Amino acid sequence: MSASSPAAPASPVRALLARINLQQYVVYVGFLAIFLFFAVVLRDSGFLTQRNLVNIVLQTAPATIMAIGLVFVLSAGDIDLSFGSTVAVSALCAAMAMAAMPAAAFPVGILAGLGAGLLVGAINGVLIAWLRLPSFLVTLATMGLVAGIGRSLTQLRSIPVTDPLFTGIFGSGSLFGVPSLVIWTVVAVAIGHVIYRQTRFGAHVLATGDNARAAQVTGIKVSRIRLWVFMISGGLAGLAGLLYAGRLQAAKYTLGETDLMTVIAAVIVGGTLLNGGKGSVIGALVGSLLMGMLNNGLILMGLSVSDQMIVRGLIILVAVAVSLREKTR
Amino acid sequence: MLDTASAPVLELSNIRKAFGGIVAIEDFSLDVRAGEVVALVGDNGAGKSTLIKIISGVYAPTSGAIRIDGQEVSMPNATKAREHGIEVVYQDLALVDQQPVYMNLFLGRELTKGPFRVLDRRQMIAETERLVTELDVRIPSAHATISDLSGGQRQGIAIARATHWARKLVLLDEPTAALGVAETAKVEKTVAALKSRDIGVLIISHSLDQVFRLSDRICVLRRGKQIGVRETAKTDKNEIVSMITGV
Ligand SMILES: Nc1ncnc2c1ncn2[C@@H]1O[C@H](COP(=O)(O)OP(=O)(O)O)[C@@H](O)[C@H]1O
Ligand SMILES: [Mg+2]
């Protein structure tokens, strides 16, 4: 504000400090702390090798993509529990379509994978936004439903994905030496961040999650926003399915099975509020890398799968506690 | 003066509103002219807020007609009302708590720039600063988060938003109920400024002193019934009080 304004703050530094929110930075501090911890403790176990660090990024790519979708859903004041099982069905649909039409494998695979994800998102969105059913219950139901469909589609069998173009672009390929999964992550985060922070749509998502009635009376089409965030979440789950199928060169009903908790943790740690109105796509990326690094480090430390689950559960508890403390500050 | 002045910007004819079995408004008719301040008074539960929400398109009336500038309109949603130049300061303010002041002033009407229509934050901030200075709303900055502001500041933002966008009519639902003396005076000044911009004002207030200071006419509601409309200059508090209470 201009200096002549009677209520201008004492100094611009103070004004800047007042705008900084501790919680937004917890994830970066946490990321650094855990990184340093592993770098020291695991210095002889190969944690710091370039190969291992790149591997962490590659492994977290699908989770990061899902996390972007969840940022939108949570920011709009809803929750999506179904994206984990959507990932598997999308990958299976893509793999089956490619097997059925090998001549046009690449486009058919993309269409089937993304289409399946968008369809689940649309079903969630219509039930939640237009029939006004609570998102927790709707997506809990579709989570189970979609998981069941994934199992019955192939009688629990794994479907190979062999199209070289598909496995290159969604898996092992690279461009100018940059692995394709890294490119997908960067592009998705960049687009997601711009839409979230720099467009009217992003502003309307935040307004919807913050105060849906206020959004409504100021002319924001709240139902349409809610439908859209579930479409985004479903579509990104579809993309994550393609990435899994490309990297593993196969699709199976177990894909994405354990991602639900990881992704929710990544997003909450990254500064997105569970009750809507506030969040960060970049934070979700760092949160996702943090979860991936944690996973990697705990394995290198020799922890059992059950111990890993316990540690991750504890991290989520801490993250939620910090997030709620900030909210009621 | 009343009939020679401009045609009514708002005409309500025989408005009735029932929520299931509860009749919140029965047979309500009222005109508001350009540059006229009409006060709506009545006890709690009389139906005042419901009436405002009918005019602004939040609720559809069960029956009756709404005309704006002589044209009958149906307002299925709040966007319609805004397109007609009607702005509302709701009793609960309708602010988005975790967003900065400037985003609230432009909520639903955010400014964009460039071919990709990215948010023009700089422009929104500049206009916000101009507006809050003009209306003397004392906030730390246009960046301040709504949840960090006092009740009076929040009220100021909601009123600033309405006055900024209004072209025909501003509806105010108890705008000074939570305010101190100085803040109340500012709101009253803002209402006077709207009047001089030839904008119609419909204000709900429990303070009869304020009603008599501000309004040209007073409309009394009691348990959903329209008891009567008086010209402020030709009535007094005793009459209005007895109309409100029915004794
Ligand atoms: N959405 C609603 N559903 C059911 N009844 C309502 C609703 N809104 C208002 N009412 C009822 O309508 C009557 C008038 O309420 P209101 O307009 O809020 O009164 P006022 O603003 O004059 O205090 C009250 O009896 C209230 O309970
Ligand atoms: Mg009321």
Image: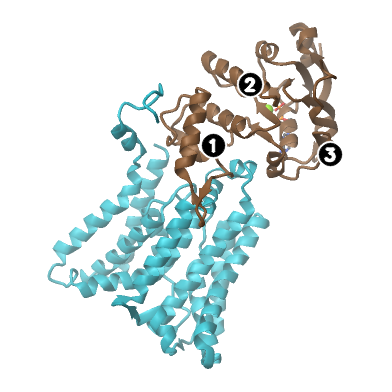
Q: Name the residue under label 3.
A: B72
Mark toward the start of the polypeptide (2 vs 1): 1
Q: Which chain did the renderer colour cyan?
A: A
For the residue marked with disc 3, what is the amino acid? Glu
Image coordinates for residue A145, horizontal then vertical, percent: 58, 71
Q: Which mark is residue B191?
A: 2
Element class at badge 2? helix
Residue at the (54%, 53%) spot, across then down? A201
Element class at badge 1? helix
Q: Name the residue under label 1.
A: B105
- 3 and 2 marks on the same chain: yes
Q: Which mark is residue A49?
A: none
Dot 2 crowding, Cα within 10 Å, few <14, some 14–19, many 20+? many
> B129 or A101: nearer the eye?
B129
- Left or right? Give the position of A307 relative to A130: left
Chain B drawing hue: brown
